[in-house]
């Protein structure tokens, strides 16, 4: 095996994220991913070109979209000879796609590829009830008219109730928010701290639009130019007035304001070698240098559902020979404000770091002014698989604008998983 | 959870039916209320011989202002209804002296008032000086356990074995068994050894002490937290985040602090120790109350049900105890209290996992009691029987009715009964009480 090659993040693009059942309510995953992909192709002048691979995914996907990404490529401005495949790792999908593309680039298997993700909470797949599905399949297998009648006689009115996908863990039947609420209690995360973080997310995202930072990261779609969830005029006082939605009674702290809303949107990121970028008249923004995944056993309550990044990051830091403080930017996906704050608190906690991470000393504090400097998911929204691409592109651009530096990406995902990475320039 | 049958027996119709059909007739048990006397009626004291224990008992009776007599003549035929009969049998050095049990009790036992108390004080048989003494002392247990089944109307009979030279340690234990605090403790044996004399205020025996209670949000745990706080302790209530709101209610009622964690977490012991050290500089009382059931016959037992029960009920107390001792978080003179169960003593159909864990808790007490003596740390366990809680309210009706009635008091206990027993163990004045497993079961027939 030859030496691995440096992988550059060359460009990124997304469509503005829309709130569930609003502007994108009739847009399909394929529509949105195509829009994000074409925007990226237009901006980089890659129309008609064949790329090494396009890797993307969606968390909520219709069964007919079994080959979604390849179909999107065929309908896009890229050459139809560009291979593609679908992946799914819950909210980690987008970042995992970037890692997969980067790995092939690093190994010399491809020179350039696009990673992306899309999700719609509006055009969600609704399936027939499992019992009705069994009956329909049996009906299909029935040979005679009599057999068909027998099968049909098994249908009961309640079987007609469809199955709607739910944002809950199959093994605990608790929603992600309810899980996060337990972790927030365990770490003593206050309502005030959560509202403060949510407020800063909106403030930072609004500021990034104001200074034109998002200009070449976004392609308007269906008349939407900015993220629909963004509330530039929100205040900690306004956030403090919201009712709690997860947890119960006096100890509940999580609201619709400090939890991410269901959102529709798509993103895509172009990764390549320096050489390929140069040949195509493009410039590396930053390099994807390290990545790591981790998972926790949340089912028996041994660890919080969304705490896997707290394990993944120290493992990655150890391999990279870095300290938590050796970063200029931290992009911690704001699934819930409490998730970010629990993770940060865990890293500061000597007992957690010793007993659960097996470290001699805690990872320590981070400079909060370096956290999610251009806004996070609380403000932008979080179309599950599209978040990774949003973060990678924005962080790469921020590092480039800064004239170099190092950034940490941390994304928690359903199923007790975490995907993390480092971008450097 | 109300005992509807018991309520019915208090009605005129109920009384008629109970009397004529020979149905169980559970007497409502009075519980101790703050500021109440240790005992609110006359006490009759008897003894085999004049002993140090006997002197200590009489000194205590004077101390608590009980009117007591040492002569039994005349009581049988009088209107006097003793609230308690206390008999000092430490002087029995041979089986010949067992005669005095019958001579003392037979004439007066019928006069014992409802919810009365019978306490026999003996010498710890294993520490007897002669085989004759040991045999006689051991015999007392058969006497108290049988008398417990004979006395009706909510009365209890208990035996206290006191080690030689430990008579000065009798106070807190006698106060407990005389008072309504021991309402549901019946047919039990408590063993008292030697220890330092602690002169604390019996009204607030835990003043200045810091107590950890796991599973403090609800049921028995909440009652334990309330009771320890009532007795003056600062309580650290521990429960899983799922019970945060219930725990907050308990803690806002009694002060202290809350700690949300799963006792089975790898770092639970360290978190508890750090919290106690940071907030209060250490701990004095540890109550391992958190417990779960996952009932299934062994043939159908799933691995996760087996593991979960052992992890919460046994391994967590074991690990937390170990760390609190090793890190010196639990101060010398402290008290550790486990919550076992009569299932851990008698076994129970469908509870192999639960009974294993609860018998293990008894093992924990027995293994550590001698080792902790040099730091004057005591370790004991309560073994609750049928206690009226949310958990037992879910038990099917028939099984629940049987569980309630098959004990000498013919009713279920209350969480407070378990809590009071724990408070007695926690009391620094109970310095001689270690290695005990006391059942709070109304003298249940299970595993008796």
Image (tube, coloured by chain):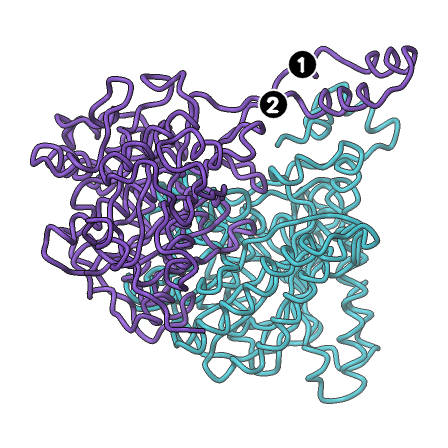
Q: Is residue A22 left or right of residue A239?
A: right
Q: Tag 1, which secondary structure?
A: helix
Q: Residue furthest bottom?
A: B129
User: Which circle, 1 or 2, is nearer the viewer?
Assistant: 2
Q: Is residue B320 above or below residue B27?
A: below
Colour cyan belongs to chain: B
Q: Who comes first in sequence, dot 1 or dot 2?
A: 2
Q: Callout 1: few (<14), some (14-19), or many (20+) C-alpha neighbours within 10 Å?
A: some
Could you say where residue A367 lies in the image, as x and y percent from the top left?
Answer: 15, 57
Q: Is residue B57 above or below residue A232?
A: below
Q: Is residue B423 left or right of residue B250?
A: right
| Residue that mark 2 sits on | A127
| Residue wearing tag 1 | A160
> Would residue A53 appear left or right of A210 to someone viewing this image?
right
Per the rendering, the mark at residue A402 is none
Callout 2: SS: loop
Q: Is residue B230 visible?
A: no
Query: Residue at point 34% right, 68% down?
Result: B282
Chain of the residue under the numbered disc 1 shown in the image: A
Foreground residue among A320 and A129: A320
Where's residue B394, x and y in %? 68, 35
Residue lying at 76% horizontally and 58% vertically, measured from the top left: B105
Colour seen for chain A: purple
Which residue occupies the extreme left position in the image? Answer: A211
Where residue B308 sits, quadrant-wise, is bottom right
Residue B210 visible in the snapshot: yes
- Residue B249, by quadrant, is top left
Image location of residue B432, percent across then percent down: 53, 74
Q: Based on the displayed image, in which of its 4 quarters is residue A149 positioned?
A: top right
Q: Residue A265 location in percent, x, y?
A: 34, 29
Q: Residue at x 76, y 51 (%)?
A: B444
How many numbered discs? 2
């Amino acid at each position: 095996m030859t030496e691995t090659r440096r992988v550059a993040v060359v460009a990124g693009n997304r469509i503005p994220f829309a709130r569930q059942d609003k502007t994108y309510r009739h847009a399909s995953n394929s529509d949105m991913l195509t829009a994000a992909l074409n925007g990226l192709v237009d901006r980089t002048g890659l129309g008609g070109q064949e790329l090494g691979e396009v890797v993307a995914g969606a968390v909520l996907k219709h069964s007919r979209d079994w080959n979604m990404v390849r179909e999107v490529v065929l309908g896009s401005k890229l050459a139809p000879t560009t291979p593609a495949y679908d992946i799914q790792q819950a909210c980690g999908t987008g970042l995992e796609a970037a890692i997969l593309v980067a790995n092939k680039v690093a190994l010399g298997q491809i020179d350039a590829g696009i990673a992306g993700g899309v999700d719609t909470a509006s055009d969600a797949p609704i399936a027939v009830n499992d019992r009705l599905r069994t009956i329909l399949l049996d009906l299909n297998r029935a040979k005679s008219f009599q057999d068909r009648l027998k099968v049909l006689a098994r249908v009961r009115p309640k079987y007609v109730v469809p199955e709607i996908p739910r944002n809950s863990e199959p093994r605990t039947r608790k929603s992600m928010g309810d899980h996060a609420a337990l972790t927030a209690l365990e770490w003593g995360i206050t309502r005030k701290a959560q509202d403060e973080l949510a407020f800063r997310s909106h403030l930072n995202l609004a500021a990034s639009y104001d200074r034109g930072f998002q200009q070449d990261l976004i392609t308007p779609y269906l008349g939407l130019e900015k993220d629909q969830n963004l509330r530039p005029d929100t205040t900690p006082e306004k956030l403090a007035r919201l009712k709690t939605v997860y947890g119960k009674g006096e100890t509940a702290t999580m609201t619709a304001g400090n939890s991410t809303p269901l959102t529709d949107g798509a993103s895509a990121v172009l990764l390549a070698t320096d050489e390929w970028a140069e040949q195509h008249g493009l410039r590396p923004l930053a390099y994807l240098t390290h990545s790591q995944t981790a998972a926790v056993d949340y089912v028996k309550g041994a660890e919080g559902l969304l705490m896997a990044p707290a394990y993944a990051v120290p493992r990655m830091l150890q391999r990279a020979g870095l300290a938590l403080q050796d970063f200029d930017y931290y992009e911690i996906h704001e699934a819930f404000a409490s998730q970010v704050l629990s993770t940060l608190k865990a890293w500061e906690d000597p007992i957690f770091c010793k007993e659960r991470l097996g470290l001699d000393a805690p990872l320590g504090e981070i400079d909060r002014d370096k956290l999610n400097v251009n806004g996070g998911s609380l403000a932008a929204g979080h179309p599950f698989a599209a978040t990774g691409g949003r973060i990678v592109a924005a962080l790469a651009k921020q590092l480039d604008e800064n004239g170099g530096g190092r950034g940490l990406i941390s994304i928690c995902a359903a199923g007790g998983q975490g995907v993390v990475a480092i971008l450097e320039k | 959870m109300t005992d509807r049958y018991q309520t019915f027996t208090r009605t005129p119709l109920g009384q008629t039916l109970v009397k004529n059909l020979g149905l169980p007739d559970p007497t409502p048990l009075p519980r101790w209320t703050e500021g109440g006397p240790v005992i609110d009626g006359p006490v009759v004291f008897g003894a085999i011989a004049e002993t140090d224990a006997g002197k200590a008992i009489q000194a205590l009776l004077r101390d608590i202002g009980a009117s007591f007599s040492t002569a039994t003549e005349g009581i049988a035929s009088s209107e006097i209804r003793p609230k308690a009969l206390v008999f000092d049998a430490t002087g029995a050095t041979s089986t010949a002296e067992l005669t005095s049990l019958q001579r003392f009790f037979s004439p007066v036992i019928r006069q014992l008032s409802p919810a009365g108390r019978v306490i026999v004080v003996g010498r710890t048989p294993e520490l007897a000086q002669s085989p004759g003494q040991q045999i006689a002392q051991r015999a007392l247990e058969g006497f108290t356990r049988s008398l417990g089944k004979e006395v009706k109307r909510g009365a209890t009979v208990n035996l206290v074995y006191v080690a030689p030279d430990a008579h000065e340690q009798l106070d807190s234990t006698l106060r407990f068994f005389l008072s309504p605090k021991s309402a549901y403790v019946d047919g039990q044996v408590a063993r008292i050894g030697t220890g330092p004399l602690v002169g604390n205020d019996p009204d607030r025996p835990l003043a200045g002490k810091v107590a950890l209670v796991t599973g403090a949000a609800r049921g028995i745990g909440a009652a334990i937290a309330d009771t320890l706080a009532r007795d003056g302790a600062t309580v650290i209530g521990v429960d899983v985040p799922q019970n945060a709101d219930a725990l907050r209610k308990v803690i806002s009622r009694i002060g202290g602090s809350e700690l949300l964690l799963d006792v089975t977490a790898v770092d639970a012991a360290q978190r508890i120790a750090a919290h106690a050290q940071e907030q209060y500089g250490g701990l004095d009382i540890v109550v391992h109350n958190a417990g779960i059931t996952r009932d299934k016959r062994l043939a159908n037992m799933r691995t996760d049900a087996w593991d979960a029960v052992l992890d919460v009920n046994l391994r967590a107390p074991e690990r937390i105890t170990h760390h609190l001792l090793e890190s010196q978080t639990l101060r010398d003179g402290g008290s550790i209290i486990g919550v076992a169960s009569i299932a851990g003593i008698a076994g129970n159909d469908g509870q192999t996992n639960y009974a294993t864990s609860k018998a293990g808790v008894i093992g924990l007490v027995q293994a550590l009691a001698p080792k902790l003596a040099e730091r004057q740390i005591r370790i004991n366990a309560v073994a609750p029987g049928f206690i009226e809680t949310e958990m037992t309210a879910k038990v099917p009706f028939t099984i629940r009715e049987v569980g309630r009635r098959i004990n000498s008091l013919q009713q279920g206990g209350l969480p407070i009964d378990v809590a009071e027993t724990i408070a007695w163990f926690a009391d620094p004045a109970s310095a001689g009480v270690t290695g005990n497993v006391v059942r709070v079961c109304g003298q249940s027939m299970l595993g008796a």
